[in-house]
Image: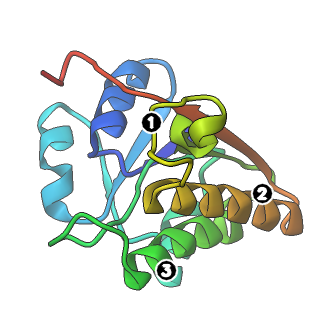
Amino acid sequence: MNLGLIGANGSIGTELSFFLKNDVNLIPITRNQLGSIFLKHHGFSCRICDVSKENDAKRYLSDLDTIVILSYATDPFSGRQTRSSQKINSDIIKNTIKFSKKNSTIIYFSTIRAFSNDIVPNTSNFLMKSGYEKEKINLEKLLLSESKKNSKRAIILRISQVFGTNQS
């Protein structure tokens, strides 16, 4: 089984890469050369591509049986959501579903904060959802609607804090 990790160089992606290294044919996917350096140093063979671009997605995702989407774009200067980062996030989901194998499974890592105050009362103030929570909820809905349109299997995993051997 070929398993691709989009956003493999992030905190969760790095941990998951090391966790799965010996169990599947793991293919870490990073957006740029810099993002792949740590993984390559540890023996991973990375694919460097921007899945938000149709040509890259078409070229690098078509042979993957399962694709895990870990990436989450924010403005590099403020760390917040902008219209351009929202477009990148939605394009990653759309392109992953559109250009993955016919019978592939797409797994999207979301956040427990998508439940917001319903489940986790301390996640936001005054019963309002943050921009992060709203964006994650929108991306979850997009994943489900696009996967249904394209007859793909989609799974959403809502996680909380992740601490592993590579994190202090």
The residue at which mark 3 appears reads as 87
Q: Residue 133 at what x, y percent from top left?
A: 51, 53
Residue type at the position of mark 2: Leu
Please, what secondary structure does the residue beneath circle 2 have?
A: helix
Residue 97 figure quarter: bottom right
Q: Is residue 48 left or right of residue 167?
A: right
Badge 3 or badge 1: first in the primary sequence: 1
Front position in the image: 33 or 43: 33
Badge 2 or badge 3: first in the primary sequence: 3
Classify the position of the N terminus by image quarter: top right
Residue 80 figure quarter: bottom left
Q: Residue furthest front?
A: 126
Q: For the residues carrying marks 2 and 1, which lies nearer the camera in this image?
A: 2
Labelled pair 3, 1 in contact (Cβ < 8 Å): no
| Residue depicted at x 49% and y 19% | 23
The residue at which mark 2 appears reads as 144
Classify the position of the C terminus by image quarter: top left
Q: Residue 57 at what x, y percent from top left?
A: 52, 71
The residue at which mark 1 appears reads as 26
Badge 2 or badge 1: first in the primary sequence: 1
Please, what secondary structure does the residue beneath circle 1 have?
A: strand
| Residue depicted at x 51% and y 26% | 24
Residue 12 figure quarter: top left
Q: CA distance from mark 3 to mark 1?
A: 27 Å
